[in-house]
Amino acid sequence: MINSKEIVKVIMHTTWWAIGFSMAYFIMLHSDARESYGIITGWWCACYLGYVTNIKIKAAIPSYLLYVIVCIISFILGYAWFYHGAGSNVSVQLVIVILLQGVVFISPIIVNTVTRRLSQKLNLA
């Protein structure tokens, strides 16, 4: 069962992604690569701030589900911001893209968990 503390951490993770993405996207508006810069910056913001605030692996599954649900709702509403090649029908390719992007979305949590456990095992912490 997920508690309120974990819900706050899921919201924090999502917010840092959004802030990092938005910040880089608007700074790089003149560039065709602004979305790529936004994704990279959002990932690093979520990774760094997630490490600082000690977001644990327990927040990964709810974060993943949140991302997938938001993508599905966006697709249903006709605003597929997460995938430029999305057609009007659900395809296997679209489902795979959503699922893999969800893994990328939670990967800062996974990286931080692995880093923390390694540093504890090697007595670096």
Image (spheres, grey):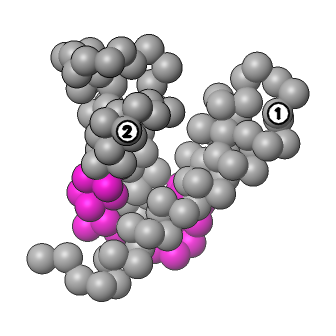
Give above or below for 88 relative to 102: above
Does 77 lie within the magenta span? no
Disc marking residue 29? 1
Q: Nearer the viewer, residue 121 or 40?
A: 40
Residue 24 found in image quarter = top right
Q: Residue tagged by mark 2?
A: 77
What SS does tag 2 mark? loop
Is 125 placed left or right of 23 in the picture?
Answer: left
At label 2, the amino acid type is: Leu
* Residue 98: percent from left, percent from top: 32, 32
Residue 30 found in image quarter = top right
The answer to whether residue 120 is seen in the rendering is no
At label 1, the amino acid type is: Leu
Can you name the residue that lies furthest to the bottom here? 4
The residue lying at 28 percent from left, 48 percent from top is 69
Bounds of the magenta segment: 46-67
Residue 58 found in image quarter = bottom left
